[in-house]
Amino acid sequence: MGGRSITMLGTGLIGDFYTMTLHGQRGRDSVGVVYSRSEERGAAFAERWNIPRSTTSMEDAINDPSTDVVVVGLPNFLHEEAVALSAAAGKAVLCTKPLARSADEAKRILDIAESAGIFAGYLEDLCYTPKTLKAIAAVEGGAIGDVTWVRSRETHPGPHSAWFWDKDKAGGGAIVDLGCHCIEIIRNFVGKANRPIDVMAWADTLVHPIKAEDNAVVLIRFESGAIGQFEVSWTFRGGMDLRDEIAGTEGTIWLNHFLRTGYEMYTSGGGGGYVAEKLESSEGWLFPVGDEVSELGYVDMFTDMFDAIETGTEPMETFYDGYVVNAIMDAAYRSAESRQWEPVEMEWRGGPTERIAKEVTHHEGHAIVKEEVLPDGRRKLILSDKDTGSIFDVVTSG
């Protein structure tokens, strides 16, 4: 099957990552048109990536006769316009994260795409990292039992473009920028059919002279009883820290995606230049990333999207997923203001989820709370009395 001709909307860092991936991995797909709000940046981007045409008209770029797929790599406040134009043109559209600035805006975007009947994929790259995909498969295979708690962390020194720092244009601060990643990672581990019920959040502006939050910690309570926790910061120094922890009734998974890569290098600074995204220095001890577009999930993400287009199936990440993420973030912002648990308000399409099962075993009729082996080989049991519920322990010979 032939490749896809792509219109790339946006010439910033994300546009570079997307085009690098599309031109370098699947091979048969290529960007034929690039849109930029700046004629100069558009021309430079087209020359850098050998793209035949650049334009400052979004509508013209989307309606190019050769274009099969539109990739939206634009600031948050332009997503709705880009999707609406793609839908009007009947073109498949792939939109970067977050889908929108709010749940209401995300729902409008979702409705536009569904009403037009176009393919619509949500480009949540960090759900596609090689480690994450392998961990999701392990969880779905039952390796750690029922998931009880997921923690996702993304921190770095702050975004690379001015619009991120503008609360009105972005829709928020670190929660919108980084929390959207964490939320969807959490949902993939607890199960997307597991309804998010309510949210408790702390958010504050600790360092930067901006209206949006630059730090936040958020809890999400799911219908199964599982808890999601994420930590985001625009004030972390030393690079980009991407970590996830997944706890279950039968095991635990720890993931470290970026800051500690297994590649460590010391330099006095003679080489200079780019090392890795958000890294603040090019000298001293550095932690380069061998294949950045792969480690950040772009390769598997675009493979999933284009395979789904070609087979007429649904991708792993959809516009509905993006809408759910926005609804959770809205609840987080309300909670940060009220300092209370706030409900997640959205149109829920999943089914009910059973609570985590409590499988109880017994010793002489008493429920076993915990058992362990002592250093001398004997077996210790923590028990709940069958009649009174009081907790006591016994030691057996093993």
Image (cartoon, rainbow, N blue to C red):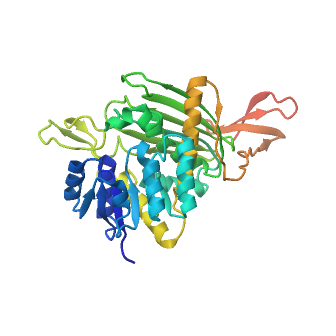
Q: Quadrant of the C terminus?
A: top right
Quarter where residue 273 is shown: top left
Q: Nearer the viewer, residue 244 or 230?
A: 230
From the top left corner, tell me how far across and down residue 11 is, in percent: 29, 50
Residue that appears at 82% across and 32% down: 385
Asked whether residue 375 is in view, the answer is no
183 left or right of 199 in image: left
Label count reads 0
From the top left corner, tell me how far across and down residue 138 is, in percent: 54, 55
Residue that appears at 42% across and 64% down: 303
Residue that appears at 33% across and 30% down: 237
Q: Quadrant of the N terminus?
A: bottom left
In the image, residue 114 above or below residue 392: below
In the image, residue 336 above or below residue 357: above
Residue that appears at 54% across and 62% down: 116
> In this view, which residue lies farthest toward the left?
270
From the top left corner, tell me how far across and down residue 274 is, in percent: 21, 44
